[in-house]
Image (tube, rainbow, N blue to C red):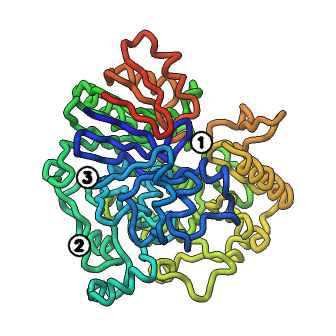
Amino acid sequence: MVKLTFYGGVREIGGNKILLEDGERKLFLDFGYPYSKYRIYYEEYLKPRAGAGLLDLLAMGLLPHLEGIYRTDLETGNLWQQFRRAEHYRRLEDIGGVLLTHAHLDHSGHISFLREDIPVYSTATTAFIAKAIQDSGKADFDQQVCYFTPRVEECLKGWKQGAYFASGGCDQQRRLRVADRLKLSEEAEQFWAEVVRHKKLDSRPLDDIGECSFNLRCFPVDHSIPGACAWGIETSSGWVVYSGDLRLHGRRGRLTEAFMHEAANLHPRALILEGTNVSKATNIAEQEVYENAFKAIDSARDLVIADFPARDVDRLLTFLRVARETRRKLAILPKDAYLLKTMRLLEPEIPDVGQEDAIVIYQETTASKNPAQWLKKTYEEYAGKVVLAKDVASNQDDFILCFSFWDLNELPSIRPQVGSLYVFSSSEPHNEEQEMDFRRLHKWLRRFGLRGLGLPVETNGDWEIPEEEKGLHASGHARGPDLLRLAREIRPGTLIPVHSEKPEFYLDNLGDAGINIVLPSEGGTVEM
Ligand SMILES: [Zn+2]
């Protein structure tokens, strides 16, 4: 019998952790960071204690109570004794792997806690972006997806046994298995191997993945981060298809179309489908974002700030095009430059930051004298392209500055001219904390006399972008009618909605489709 158990992504957007079992064979579909569950108990200054290992996460219900799947260096004392009576406790061994759909942390983040011998299957782009995010981010102990530093005692033990001499350190690299490429350039191999020298990226055809013993299909799809895919798993009860996050209206929407047709041809027994935007009836396409942004920026005087989601490379390229056509320079942050450089290792059509005249790199005013290795290398490599606050301040109409809310503290050094433009090209707030941030953002704009465009405003407790300013953000997720089309065309025996706050949408709208719809429960199992 095939069983699907849902440990995350149930009535929440993100945090997907789905266990697929077919007799003895087991796989996880994503193993994401559950932002909304964290927010119930934690905030910026109240966090799970890194030194407590798995304890806080298990005690607070942020990780499923599955003994045997986690890194042993994070176990303290008799950790499991206190959880063996917990509701969904299980001992679980021999996981064949994690099928990762994309590098957004709400799908990948908690891979950090899994045993390092559990392989992670993904596209090459997802593996590389995950590493770039970790290299250039804060990489807290709960977000070390690609590599991690084991806790001290484990490290010393390994040191004594000589296991770490070859790599010169304790860092452990996870076993990522690339599903869509057989050959990587030497440069790409090097990028991957720079953490733990003796570990190369493992890439081989999917039908040669002996160890997870399932027949797998990896379907590239379009989402707001490059490299996203959906998965097909052939089980003894038929194919199970898992969508990950996707959209039909983006630049690579034809990939999602192709997935839809190929998945339909498998006549799947089950389809696990996302439902982030079930209540949205319409979509903005990336082309409209370009047109609207161009119109606004072409007529702008003084400084332009563009605020868009990190790692949305499509959006970055949209603003690059606008910058070229309005004869401005796109001032990106070092982490954006690092991401573009990483992507170029796999996709030569991505612009070369060093050669692209319309790109410069903004250096934070109070940058550390002793920057991290990746940052130092980035500044060195693009030395001629670095601009400082004073360069932007003295030639404001030369730039589109790629800042988000978190970079606003640079503004006192830049002092934008009154009437400068702040283009908001991202989504509305989804929770109270984000609403607070938006209130702050509005205050910052007022303080510096910036003109906001596309910014959500609060009316009677609801946050909405004014009608005439819509069209500056294309969502990463398919709208309701597109999701229904996906479900109807793929026509699975059973549809299981995840990654949605309103999964009933499918019950309400697919009653006539002859599809059995099952709403999963947290920790609950759907049997096939
Ligand atoms: Zn996503």
- Classify residue 290 by image quadrant: top right
Label 2 is placed on what type of residue?
Glu
Query: Crowding near pointer 1: few (<14 within 10 Å), some, many (20+)?
Result: many
Q: Which residue is mark 3?
A: 96
Q: Is residue 413 above or below residue 349?
A: below
| Ligand 1 is within 8 Å of the C-beta of the residue at disc 1 | no
Q: Which residue is mark 2?
A: 186
Q: Position of residue 204 (x, y in %)?
A: 17, 57
Q: Is residue 236 above or below residue 57?
A: above
Residue at 62% over, 47% down:
425
Circle 3 — which element?
loop
Q: Position of residue 291 (x, y in %)?
A: 57, 41
Residue at 19% over, 62% down:
183
Q: Is residue 151 visible?
A: yes
Q: Is residue 475 above or below residue 402?
A: above
Residue at 66% over, 36% down:
470
Label 1 is placed on what type of residue?
His
Quarter holding the C terminus is top left
244 left or right of 439 in image: left
Disc 2 or 3, which lies upstream in sequence? 3
383 left or right of 363 in image: left
Disc 1 or 2, which lies upstream in sequence? 2
Quarter holding the N terminus is top left
Q: Which residue is mark 1?
A: 473
Label 3 is placed on what type of residue?
Gly
